[in-house]
Image: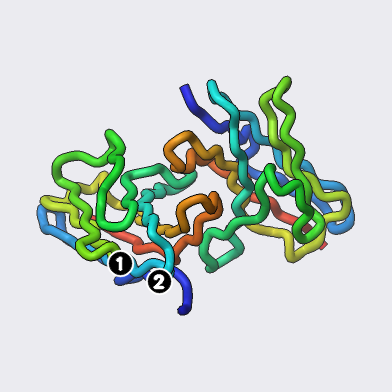
């Protein structure tokens, strides 16, 4: 079955601390993985995708096929990073399968 | 072009009534998707269109739900005989073929009382 698991509903860190938001997936083919972010009162927006191997707002994510993971990391969290983060898998028919999301709270 | 637009933003309806939502995608995007999001969950796929053709429907989309995209531009999602379990945020997104990144609208929040 195709599935995305985000085990943490809430992750609370202090400003300047490292952040790792966990994402594991189950997919039989070659996965395409994404991170979407939703800031308070804003729409869901694409943060990054694994194929572009880019760093957006200091966040990076590496696809680990052996561990079927796509964890999102940032070395030094900022208060403005507080948001809801969703990991998503795109299947062969271009639809996204989302995890249940992790709320990141960065405390001052 | 101001992105993906959804109307209305909020809808409160009585159980048993019919409701219709509208989505206007980014004009050059030929793919349009509908998702549903309930509290504490990520968005769940409902259906998608490529131009005016509806290519896939989720099992979540019961026969009370119907979606159209008549001219390959805007889309409507209708729910007939609403039930309390239909209360959710309904999200629309669009993309270009070959581009894996979706652009989401702000959603329509449906409350069935």
Task: Please tell me which residue is depicted at 54% across the width and 67% down the height of the picture.
Answer: A42
- Between disc 1 and disc 2, whose residue precedes? 2
Figure check: B18 above or below B27? above
User: Camera-side residue: B96 or B6?
Assistant: B96
x, y percent for residue B94: 43, 59
Give the class, few, some or many, for how many residues have Cα within 10 Å of label 1's Cα (few <14, many ≥20): some
x, y percent for residue B35: 38, 50
Task: Give the alpha-carbon distance from disc 1 to disc 2, as whole Å.
Answer: 7 Å
Q: Is residue B31 left or right of residue A19?
A: left
Q: Quadrant of the C terminus of chain A?
A: bottom right
x, y percent for residue A94: 46, 42
Marks 2 and 1: in contact by CB < 8 Å?
yes
Query: Disc 2 is attached to a residue of which chain?
Result: B
Q: Is residue A15 left or right of residue A31?
A: right
**Share a chain, discs 1 and 2?**
yes
Task: Please tell me which residue is depicted at 29% across the width and 52% down the height of the picture.
Answer: B87
Q: Residue furthest bottom?
A: B1
Give the class, few, some or many, for how many residues have Cα within 10 Å of label 2's Cα (few <14, many ≥20): some
Task: Please tell me which residue is depicted at 29% across the width and 43% down the height of the picture.
Answer: B55
SS type, badge 2 = loop
Residue B73 shows which numbered tag? Answer: 1
Residue B27 shows which numbered tag? Answer: 2
User: Camera-side residue: B100 or A96?
Assistant: B100
Task: Please tell me which residue is depicted at 35% across the width and 61% down the height of the picture.
Answer: B109
């Amino acid at each position: 079955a195709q599935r995305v698991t985000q085990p943490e509903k809430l992750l609370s860190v202090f400003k300047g601390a490292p952040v790792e938001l966990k994402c594991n997936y189950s997919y039989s083919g070659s996965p395409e993985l994404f991170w979407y972010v939703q800031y308070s009162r804003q729409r869901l927006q694409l943060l990054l995708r694994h194929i572009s191997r880019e760093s957006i707002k200091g966040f990076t994510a590496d696809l680990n096929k052996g561990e079927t993971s796509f964890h999102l990391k940032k070395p030094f969290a900022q208060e403005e990073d507080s948001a809801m983060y969703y990991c998503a898998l795109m299947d062969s028919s271009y639809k996204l399968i989302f995890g249940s999301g992790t709320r990141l709270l960065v405390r001052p | 072009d101001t992105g993906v637009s959804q109307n209305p933003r909020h809808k409160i309806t009585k159980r048993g009534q019919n409701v219709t939502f509208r989505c206007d995608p980014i004009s050059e995007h030929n793919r349009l998707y509908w998702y549903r999001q309930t509290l504490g969950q990520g968005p769940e796929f409902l259906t998608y269109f490529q131009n005016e053709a509806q290519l896939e429907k989720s099992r979540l989309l019961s026969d009370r739900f119907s979606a159209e995209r008549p001219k390959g531009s805007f889309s409507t999602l209708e729910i007939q005989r609403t039930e309390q379990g239909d209360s959710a945020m309904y999200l629309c997104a669009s993309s270009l073929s070959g581009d894996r990144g979706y652009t989401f609208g702000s959603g329509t929040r449906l409350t069935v009382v």
